[in-house]
Amino acid sequence: MRVLRIAHSSLTPALRQRERALKRRYPDVDLRVITTERWREAEMEVEAAADDLFPVSMARTYFSKHIQLFAYDPRPIIAALRKHKPHLIELNHEPYSVACAEVLTLCQWLAPQASIVMQACQNILHNYPPPFNWLEQRAFRRIAAAHGCSDTVCEVLLAKGLEKPVAVIPFGVDAEAFHPSAALKERSERGPTIGYIGRMLPGKGLNVLADALTKLGAEPWQLLVVGDGSEREGFEQNLRASGLFNRAEFAGAISFDLVPEYFKRLDVLVIPTQTTKRIREQFGRVIVEAMASGIPVVGSTCGAIPEVIGNAGLVFPEGDADELACVLRRALSDSALREHLARAGRKRVEEHYSWDRVADQTYELFQRVLTTIGADCLTDFSLSSSTTRSMVEKPAIN
């Protein structure tokens, strides 16, 4: 099976964990990856790097730094299509994007026989003006199947009119790099530490977290914030106004390989995201990283957060600082509850979110697409996994 993956963010081996697991577990997959020369990930500029498991080609980007408006230098894609002659192309771009339109055009010219599987992440229903709505419907006609990281992503694809099979394939986590710390008892003796790890942007609910912490001001806790962004200054000001700033440590934006060490310092991780016109949590990778690390998660009801947490954390209504304070108080005061959630989270990761499990789901989808196309019976396409589904009806989107 010759597979070509085109993804702007598959820059380094650490960001290609799913592809690496797929190659390790399925030697029959002849994989090649095309990515950008550099991209901004988690508020940091990341340079592309080679891989020891498969060839990686880097392409320049043109016209825009916006994820949906840029175009690739077509030459690396043309070279890969001609040399690799892929059976299947996995395209990690939204259907209305310029890059998606570019790749589909090149495939039409140079690889019309290849099956195309689209990986999408958008989970907010938008109706785009021309030409983006035309590009979107063109993509829906051309692809053989799609997959999204959560139910909310797949619901949006179906609501937009996609009539091809759609599968849920979540993001994964390196369960060896992220693992429970042997120093949990020592950490708890220093006092409970609440953590926020992620971008500090509008819609991430930092104002709600600040209000909740103010309500917990009389109780012992520490705060560790890892990340940066436009909302950091306002969050710091809120903590100063409440007399809580001296309890907080701000680590700023850090490289991905340093993140596991910060989880070892936490007792609880908070994901307070709020739904806006532009923000609805698509998955929340930091959630599975925390669960793999044995850290209980407190998350809002925004987007896919409850879906990802499952029974391994506590959920509060998004935007409700009172409820967040209550849930945090419960988690911080009950060590037995934290231990239970830590075990449940680790188990949930091993069953659903390890990269090996995600690679298995990916391979299953690829195999079924190629088998179905070969049998010329696309309408009979179905997936057996409990975390995947074929398109049956278009659900309502609120």
Image: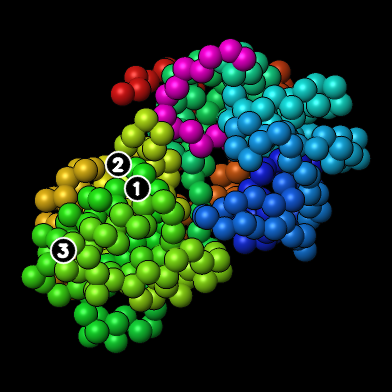
Q: Earlier in the sequence, mark 3 or mark 1?
A: 1
Viewer can see residue 244: yes
State which quadrant residue 221 falls in. Answer: bottom left
Magenta segment includes 325:
no
By secondary structure, the bulk of the magenta-drawn segment is best described as loop
Q: Earlier in the sequence, mark 2 or mark 1?
A: 1
At 29% across and 57% down in the image, what residue appears? 235
Q: Is the C terminus in the top left, top right, bottom left or bottom right quadrant?
A: top left
Q: Earlier in the sequence, mark 2 or mark 3?
A: 3
Question: Where residue 155 appears, x then y in whole percent?
Answer: 42, 27
Q: Is residue 217 left or right of residue 260?
A: left
Identify the residue position indicated by label 1 in the image.
Answer: 204
Magenta segment includes 123:
yes
Q: Is residue 45 above or below residue 160?
A: below
Are the two marked residues, 2 and 1, in contact with CB atoms closer than 8 angstroms? yes
- Classify mark 3: residues with Cα within 10 Å, few (<14), some (14-19) or many (20+): some
- Classify mark 2: residues with Cα within 10 Å, few (<14), some (14-19) or many (20+): many
Label placed on residue 274: 2
Q: Is residue 56 left or right of residue 231?
A: right
Question: Where residue 177 appears, x then y in whole percent?
Answer: 52, 70
Camera-side residue of 278 and 7? 278
Viewer can see residue 113: no
Q: Is residue 219 left or right of residue 315?
A: left
Identify the residue position indicated by label 3 in the image.
Answer: 242
Task: Give the Cα separation between the discs numbered 2 and 3.
Answer: 22 Å
Q: Is the N terminus in the top left, top right, bottom left or bottom right quadrant?
A: top right
Camera-side residue of 125 and 295? 125
At 12% across and 64% down in the image, what residue appears? 216
State which quadrant residue 98 falls in. Answer: top right
Q: Secondary structure at mark 2?
A: loop
**What are the residue bounds of the magenta stretch?**
118-131
